[in-house]
């Protein structure tokens, strides 16, 4: 049995799903369509294929601990988690993965999957993978063409050519087509010769690298250089920042697939959706008899065809239709369903105004757990802190603030200067300004605490780390 190596690309930010998707917690790490994240669903839908090897993940360096934790939650041990210091689009990411796989087996089959897609018909997807694998074993670079159900103008298209003589069920690629206008899209769908471009691929590592080296030697050389001097960091492969930053940013479509003569397309009628907007999530969600898709504490009266997601507070809608309402701890988005493609404009305004609501949620994840802002004012700030069993924060100090810690539940081991304290529920301690300190959970359950900070400056960058098991700077 020939193994297939899944390569999961998880570098996107998903700005069109703001305010739920943010830079520090993008859409692929969120449970949008099930109780698992999109990333977990992407990996889990392959487990029933015995020919699948352990996945190779390529992700943003800032998401590394969340991705590792999400893989642990679904009992998956990745072959490697490769960390990109900066985003350089899909061609360099795939190149690095191909180079890694080719070191062990130049003929390794790579199944390249974005981490944030939905697939409704998993059995049909498996069939399409096996068809694409046959094409790849014969030297083709296979892409999956989604059978177009509607004339979408937001997708690129692939026009199929003649059937491949050496791989049943696959076709030559006649052309890649940019996003069309509505009339053109209607013609594409009516013809039956055009498919949506899914951004999923299957090919041999050496075949992809041969084409990349021929068509874009600059990307090939920069990717190889970044991997050659990569460093192991805990369970991660950290690409060299300076070398990888110098790599051109390019999609695999533009770099290789639209230029190679070896491209093949496998038609895939698999219930696919790339979850590119709130309206697309409404389309695939379960709905009530009035067409409303809801999640959380939601009350509706005389409301139709709405998408409502409440993360913390109750959300009530009365007498409205075709709205998207998304409530988080610090932002509420209200939009017409036909305007949600413009959510990115709001994110761009937040960036221009140097606000932080596009970057982080109130609850901020860390490798040891999370913290959440509760209240703040002049010279004080209150946070909730959760530390997972066996985890500990860095040994650190602050120049501008003191801290009071109150244990709500669990057990805390507190280092404060030369003293080590063991605190349990309802006990507290004080960390003076400038004192070296550390918080650790030695217990078997989550540690929950309230932290009260006071001082002249309360920013997260007022941390001097002396020792950190997560090797953060």
Image (cartoon, grey):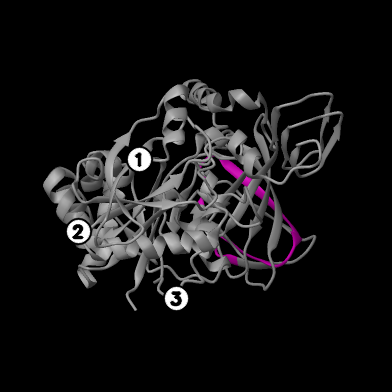
Q: Is the stretch drawn in magenta largely helix, strand or loop?
A: strand
- Determine whether the residue tagged by mark 1 lies in a helix, strand or loop: strand
Q: How crowded is mark 3: few (under 14 residues within 10 Å), some or many (20 or more)?
A: few
Regarding residue 315, the answer to whether it shows in the image is: yes
Q: Which of marks 1 and 3 is in front?
A: 1
375 left or right of 315 in image: left
- Specify whether residue 314 is painted magenta: no
- Which residue lies under the disc numbered 2? 207
Nearer to me, 184 or 215: 184
Q: Which of marks 1 and 3 is nearer the N terminus?
A: 3
The residue under the point 40% across, 74% down is 51
- Determine whether the residue tagged by mark 2 lies in a helix, strand or loop: helix
- Which residue lies under the disc numbered 1? 158
- How many marks on residues? 3
- Specify whether residue 417 is painted magenta: yes
- Which residue lies under the disc numbered 3? 50
Q: Residues within 10 Å of mark 1 (few under 14, many from 20)?
A: many
Give residue 331's position: percent from left, percent from top.
Answer: 66, 31
Q: Give the range drawn in magenta.
A: 397-419
**Disc 1 and disc 2: Cα gap in Å?**
21 Å
- Determine whether the residue tagged by mark 3 lies in a helix, strand or loop: loop
Q: Which of marks 2 and 3 is nearer the N terminus?
A: 3
Nearer to me, 241 or 424: 241
Give residue 299's position: percent from left, percent from top.
Answer: 85, 37
Nearer to me, 31 or 163: 163
Q: Nearer the viewer, mark 1 or mark 2?
A: 1
Farthest right residue?
301
Q: Earlier in the sequence, mark 1 or mark 2?
A: 1
């Amino acid at each position: 049995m020939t193994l297939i190596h899944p390569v999961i690309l998880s570098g996107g930010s998903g700005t069109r799903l703001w305010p739920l998707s943010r830079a520090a917690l993008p859409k692929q790490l969120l449970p949008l369509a099930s109780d698992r994240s999109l990333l977990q669903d992407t990996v889990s839908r392959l487990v029933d294929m015995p020919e699948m090897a352990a996945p190779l993940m390529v992700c943003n360096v800032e998401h590394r601990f969340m991705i590792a934790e999400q893989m642990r939650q679904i009992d998956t041990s990745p072959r490697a988690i490769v960390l990109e210091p900066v985003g350089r689009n899909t061609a360099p990411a795939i190149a690095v993965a191909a180079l890694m796989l080719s070191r062990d087996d130049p003929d390794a089959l790579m199944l390249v999957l974005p981490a944030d897609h939905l697939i409704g018909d998993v059995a049909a997807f498996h069939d399409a993978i096996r068809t694409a694998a046959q094409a790849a074993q014969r030297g083709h670079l296979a892409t999956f063409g989604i059978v177009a159900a509607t004339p979408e103008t937001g997708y690129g298209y692939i026009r199929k050519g003649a059937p491949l003589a050496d791989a049943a069920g696959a076709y030559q690629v006649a052309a890649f087509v940019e996003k069309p206008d509505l009339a053109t899209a209607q013609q594409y769908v009516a013809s039956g010769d055009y498919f949506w471009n899914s951004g999923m691929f299957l090919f041999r590592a050496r075949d992809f690298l041969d084409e990349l080296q021929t068509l874009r030697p600059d990307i090939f050389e920069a990717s190889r250089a970044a991997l050659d001097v990569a460093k192991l960091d805990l369970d991660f492969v950290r690409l060299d920042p300076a070398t990888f930053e110098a790599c051109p940013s390019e999609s695999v479509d533009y770099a290789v697939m639209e230029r190679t003569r070896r491209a093949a397309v496998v038609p895939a009628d698999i219930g696919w959706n790339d979850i590119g907007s709130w309206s697309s999530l409404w389309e695939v969600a379960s709905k009530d008899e009035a067409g409303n898709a809801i999640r959380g504490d939601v009350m509706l009266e005389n409301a139709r065809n709405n998408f409502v997601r409440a993360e913390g507070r109750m959300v009530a809608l009365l007498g409205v239709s075709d709205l998207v309402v998304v409530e988080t701890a610090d932002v509420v988005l209200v939009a017409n369903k036909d305007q949600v493609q413009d959510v990115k404009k709001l994110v761009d305004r937040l960036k221009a105004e140097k606000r932080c609501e596009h970057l982080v949620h109130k609850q901020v994840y860390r490798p040891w757990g999370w913290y959440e802002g509760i209240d703040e004012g002049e010279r004080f700030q209150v946070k909730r802190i959760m530390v997972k069993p066996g985890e500990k924060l860095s040994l650190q100090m602050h120049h501008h603030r003191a801290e009071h810690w109150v244990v709500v539940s669990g057990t805390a081991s507190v280092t404060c200067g030369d003293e080590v304290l063991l605190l349990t529920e309802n006990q507290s301690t004080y960390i003076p300004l400038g004192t070296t300190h550390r918080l650790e959970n030695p217990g078997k359950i989550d540690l929950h605490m309230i932290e009260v900070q006071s001082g002249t400056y309360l920013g997260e960058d007022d941390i001097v780390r002396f020792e950190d098991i997560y090797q953060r700077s």
